Image (tube, rainbow, N blue to C red):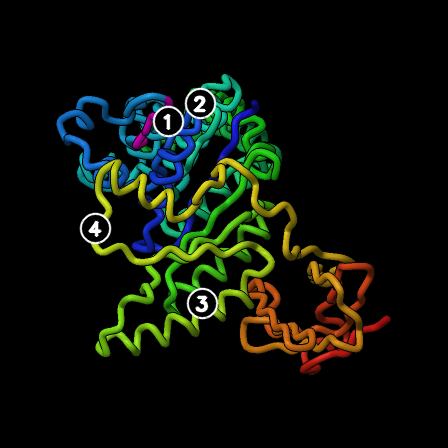
Amino acid sequence: MSTRIILFAGKGGVGKTSVAAATGIRAAKLGYRTLIMSLDTAHSLADVFDLDWGLMDKKRGKVVALGKNLWIQEVDVQEEIERNWGEVHKYVSTLFNVSGLDEVLAEELAILPGMEEVSCLLYINQYVKDKSYDLMVLDCAPTGESLRFISVPTTLEWYMKKIFTLERNLLRLARPFFKSLSSIPLPEDSYFRSLERLYGRLSGVDRILTDGRITTVRLVTNPEKIVIKETQRAFMYFCLYGLWIDAVIMNRVLPDQVSDGYFSGWKEAQGKYISSAEEYFSPVPIWQVELFPNEILGRKDLSRLAETIYGRKDPTRIFYREKPYQFTKKAGRLVLTVKLPFTSKEDLDLSRSYDELVIRVGGFKRHVPMPRSVGSAEPTQARIEGNTLTIYFGGEDGREKKSCSPAG
């Protein structure tokens, strides 16, 4: 089989690492050669498995075998900087040092945003090409950093195609002249060769991440207002980047047997937010996971968690195969397409509420978070074709209009 990749993403503290580890354990038991990789600089994967710190220190940044079919890896950014970013890091560090910063501080600050993400992507690309594993479970950093991680291939490709060659040629001409005028160093050609090699090693990783037959995202959330809101926005951004979301895991739901009056307010609030999640994420499946009576530590607890999440299901399956919605641009206007089966224009109502579009179909309601680039633009036109609703924003009166009726 080709390598399957599952990203677990969500707000910090929702239980991503535990869910990712539990998924890996379940897959390994089913016979899949499984690697669980931590993409978060504040690694907690070894902690969840309750591993010996001495072992992890000796294996810093390397793949560690935990038993039959199961490996973990906590990528060490410092080692990756030396391995992959030598010339780039050296130049940036020198630049900071010349500006007056202490040498040690300059080396720390020279770890620029994106270096860690590229290092992880290099591993992913290599493992997929070598077919090293059947399944790669990626324990992502909190939402914002996860989005930066998936945006790196596109950003780097743009730089290499639009800026890199021009910058390299200009500096080749300017370097001798500039050296006689200033002590500020310009990057040598070895700096550009280093970037070129990195770009070559990343080739194809963007196609791996956006291929829904290989890679899907599972969002981990809790039934709390702030957490659900961030999960909703992450849902939208992953869709924008072209990744496929095949499940949402609602973690730490208070079980029915918790009947103490002290928790009644919590249970009522959780019920409300779980219902809201249906409006936000449907038709992507939502799996509820009850709060455990103890801290989840070690393989025994993680195996119990896996059984709670998946039951008898194979976790490597793709549980939802369509993009619930997609944003595009046509003739300068934002266009949103939404999958809404069994919808007629008579049932449909659209309205804008702050940073969301509210879609009502009879008794069904869906909230779709809007990209910030849309600003205050209102939906001005809607069409239904088959099971797809297409909504257009903006236009001549797009900023004043508060709702719209669908066209046939």
C-alpha span from label 2 to label 1 = 7 Å
**Mark 1 vs 3, N-terminal side:** 1
Q: Which disc is residue 135 wearing?
A: none
Kind of residue sitting beneath label 3: Ile
Asked which secondary structure carries label 3, the reply is helix
Residue lying furthest left: 54
Relative to residue 4, is residue 112 depicted above or below? Answer: below
Mark 4 closeness class: few <14, some 14–19, many ≥20 residues within 10 Å:
few
Residue 189 visible in the displayed image: no
Q: Which disc is residue 85 wearing?
A: 1
The answer to whether mark 1 and mark 4 are in CB contact below 8 A is no
C-alpha span from label 4 to label 3 = 23 Å
Picture coordinates of residue 85 (x, y %)? 37, 27
Residue at the (56%, 24%) spot, across then down: 2
The answer to whether mark 2 and mark 1 are in CB contact below 8 A is yes
Residue lying furthest top: 130
Q: Residue 402 vs residue 101: left or right?
A: right
Residue at the (42%, 32%) spot, across then down: 27
Q: In the rendered image, which residue does mark 4 sit on?
A: 295
The chief SS type of the magenta part is strand
**Mark 2 vs 1, N-terminal side:** 1
The answer to whether mark 2 and mark 4 are in CB contact below 8 A is no
Kind of residue sitting beneath label 1: Trp
Q: Which disc is residue 194 wearing?
A: 2
Which residue is at the front of the view, 374 or 258?
258
Q: In the rendered image, which residue does mark 3 sit on?
A: 274
C-alpha span from label 1 to label 3 = 44 Å
Query: From the viewer's perspective, is the residue at label 2 or at label 3 nearer?
Result: 3
Picture coordinates of residue 82 (x, y %)? 31, 24
Kind of residue sitting beneath label 2: Ser
- In magenta, the rendered stretch is 69-75
Quarter of the image where the C terminus is located: bottom right
